[in-house]
């Protein structure tokens, strides 16, 4: 999340001393070759003969070495790619006592860790082995997705639609809400009969979201709805719409009349504002 501090931690193993280590990162998926930012260079052991590695104080397979930590805060959302890099064992690159050990006695592993021009092909027990030295060593790439700070949508408007109807008939109900960041939204409907819909959508912020419902039994029900944005920020339930499925045939005419009104309201969405308010549509 933007403007939220995040800790990144790493260790450098496989060496005797860490001369330099830091993070480099940016929006390119290959931060080894292309990066925008770097963190502090941890060079406190540069020139020492030991120190800074994750293997310090290792005992019985357990390590108690140096862990490097950087705390970063992102202000711009996006996709970021990180790599930790290290330069090690540079003090061992040259022979310390050439009068005793000659000029080039060091083991292959030292050459491999300190000299990027070193190349050797060896016949090993497992076959031919090609060795290429490096001056800098890199971790696997870490991919981090940074999302913007987010507010939940406004509580959806009270649902609109037929307030009376007939069991077994499908009716359409509507609502709308505004998301502060303009994100698309999903709606979940509580139909008041023990059934709750899945998240339906997405719908554009400010546009009408609709859902259909058919009741199997007569009775009175409270329909309410809530919303969430595409980032998962969720609202409370809306004010409920009180609806009635008629209990006797005397409601049939009213039911047909309401169906006619619904048809008129859908065909002329800006007409009859007073009538809409009276019938709760």
Image: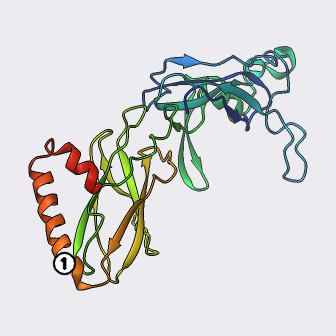
Q: Residue at x 79, y 19 (%)?
A: 102
Left or right position of 237 against 48: left
Left or right position of 100 against 23: right
Looking at the picture, the colour scheme in use is rainbow
Q: Position of residue 109 (x, y in %)?
A: 69, 35
- Residue 19 vertical placement versus 246 (above, below): above
Task: Classify the position of the N terminus by image quarter.
Answer: top right
Q: Position of residue 258 (x, y in %)?
A: 18, 65
Q: Position of residue 28 (x, y in %)?
A: 42, 27
Nearer-the-camera pick, 125 or 149:
149
Quarter-of-image position of residue 6: top right
- Residue 74 vertical placement versus 131 (above, below): above
Q: Secondary structure at mark 1?
A: helix
- Residue 51 vertical placement versus 200 (above, below): above
Q: Position of residue 157 (x, y in %)?
A: 38, 47
Left or right position of 188 against 146: left
- Residue 184 vertical placement versus 34 (above, below): below
Quarter-of-image position of residue 256: bottom left
Confirm whether residue 281 shows in the render: no
- Few, some or many C-alpha atoms within 10 Å of disc 1 (few <14, some 14-19, many ≥20)? few
Quarter-of-image position of residue 2: top right
Q: Residue at x 85, y 14 (%)?
A: 99
Q: Residue at x 41, y 59 (%)?
A: 188
Name the residue beneath numbered marker 1: 252
Task: Classify the position of the C terminus by image quarter.
Answer: bottom left
Confirm whether residue 230 shows in the render: yes
């Amino acid at each position: 999340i933007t403007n939220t501090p995040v800790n990144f931690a790493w260790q450098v193993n496989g060496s005797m001393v860490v001369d330099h280590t830091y993070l480099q990162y940016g929006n390119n998926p290959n931060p080894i070759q292309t990066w925008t930012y770097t963190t502090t260079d941890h060079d406190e052991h540069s020139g020492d003969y030991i120190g800074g590695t994750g293997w310090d104080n290792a005992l019985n397979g357990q390590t108690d070495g140096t862990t490097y930590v950087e705390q970063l805060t992102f202000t711009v959302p996006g996709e970021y790619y990180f790599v930790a890099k290290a330069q090690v064992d540079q003090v061992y690159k040259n022979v310390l006592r050439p009068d005793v050990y000659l000029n080039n006695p060091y083991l292959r592993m030292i050459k491999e860790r300190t000299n990027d021009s070193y190349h050797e092909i060896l016949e090993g027990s497992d076959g031919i082995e090609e060795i290429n030295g490096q001056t800098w060593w890199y971790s696997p790439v870490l991919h981090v997705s940074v999302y913007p700070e987010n507010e939940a949508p406004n509580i959806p408007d009270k649902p609109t639609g037929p307030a009376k109807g007939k069991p077994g008939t499908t009716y359409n109900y509507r609502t709308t809400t505004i998301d502060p960041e303009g994100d698309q939204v999903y709606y979940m409907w509580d139909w008041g009969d023990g059934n709750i819909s899945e998240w339906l959508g997405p719908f554009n912020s400010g546009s009408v979201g609709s859902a259909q419902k058919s009741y199997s039994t007569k009775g009175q029900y409270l329909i309410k709805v809530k919303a969430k944005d595409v980032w998962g920020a969720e609202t409370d339930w809306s004010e409920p719409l009180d609806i009635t499925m008629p209990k006797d045939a005397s409601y049939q005419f009213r039911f047909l009349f309401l169906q006619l009104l619904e048809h008129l309201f859908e065909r002329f969405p800006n007409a009859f504002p007073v009538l809409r308010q009276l019938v709760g549509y």
